[in-house]
Amino acid sequence: MMTEKPGIFMGGDTPYEEADAVILGIPMDYTVSFRPGTRLGPLTIRNVSMGIEEYSVYLDRDLTDYAYCDCGDLSLPFGNVEKSLQLIEEASRQVIEDGKFPIFLGGEHLVTYPLIKPFMERYPELRVVHFDAHADLRTDYYGEPNSHATVMRKVSEALGPKRVYQFGIRSGTRDEFLFAKQHNHLVVEEVLEPLREVLPELQGKPVYVTLDIDVVDPAFAPGTGTQEPGGCTSREIIKAIHALGELNVVGFDLVEISPLTDSSERTALLGAKIVREVILSFVK
């Protein structure tokens, strides 16, 4: 696994061999359908992480008590979608085989599919919790099957019926919502309360969490390529992470942060805070 390390997430300097959790950037945004720039998301999250505390007042836990390694960004062949997806899958598989809890930072949402594939091999009972403004359930986008607009269709078809739980969705085609009604658990617009309602049926199951930052309203998180008004608050998405802490979460990705549409960097700051809460909530 070849990586570049222009900076690290705060405190993420534990040697890889000694780390319980691993942060890995996936700087790919080759298939975005509106505004590009999410390849810069991982680096921007790292750069602003110095602006938040290591201590979580919500959880009364501190990052200094956790061993995690920031491996930098995965080296990808720019513009080569197929080869990049292959390398992303290989990197995900290596992290799992090494027994580390993975925190992947995108990049566009298409990266989630190769990231999840090794988890499906490892965990036959895998469930996926998906936070997003968009359903991402298209079969193709203008004839292209590999797109950030098709990622959850790929995941859903690979996992099988009723194993994907989608929250905050408020955009998509009629066909996407028909597919979701038949195959997934999809909640329109709402996030926290519907999530709490399904926690009992997720208990005991391995869960992978994928979080597209545009689930949060652009008033709180404008730094994303496909903004969609009507989302949840930054406070609500943090509470959703805490709610998931009672489950067996085996992997996590945070995608679609694009600093080019956010001069204040508040979206990356939210991303950094989410990463902190993920480490403190999911890493045992």
Image (tube, grey):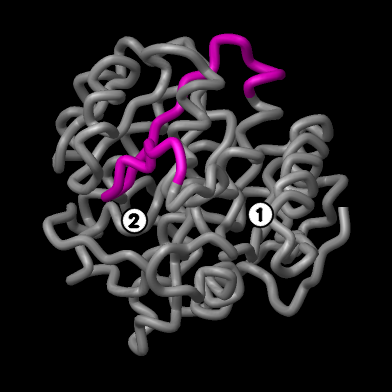
Residue 251 located within the stretch drawn in magenta: no
Residue 163 spot, x, y in % from top left = 42, 17
Question: Which secondary structure dominates the residues rendered in magenta?
Answer: loop
Highlighted magenta segment, given as a residue range? 120-140
Query: Can residue 210 be seen in this snapshot?
Result: no
Residue 59 spot, x, y in % from top left = 37, 46
- The crowding category of the residue bearing disc 1, from other C-alpha atoms within 10 Å (few below 14, some 14 to 19, many at least 20), is many
- At 64% from the left and 65% from the top, the residue drawn is 27
- The crowding category of the residue bearing disc 2, from other C-alpha atoms within 10 Å (few below 14, some 14 to 19, many at least 20), is few
Does 256 sit above or below residue 38?
above
Q: CA distance from mark 1 to mark 2?
A: 22 Å
- At 46% from the left and 24% from the top, the residue drawn is 156
Q: Is residue 95 left or right of 167 when viewed as pictured?
A: right
Residue 17 vs residue 269, the one in the foreground = 269
Residue that badge 2 annotates: 57
Query: Can residue 209 be seen in this snapshot?
Result: yes
- At 28% from the left and 21% from the top, the residue drawn is 185
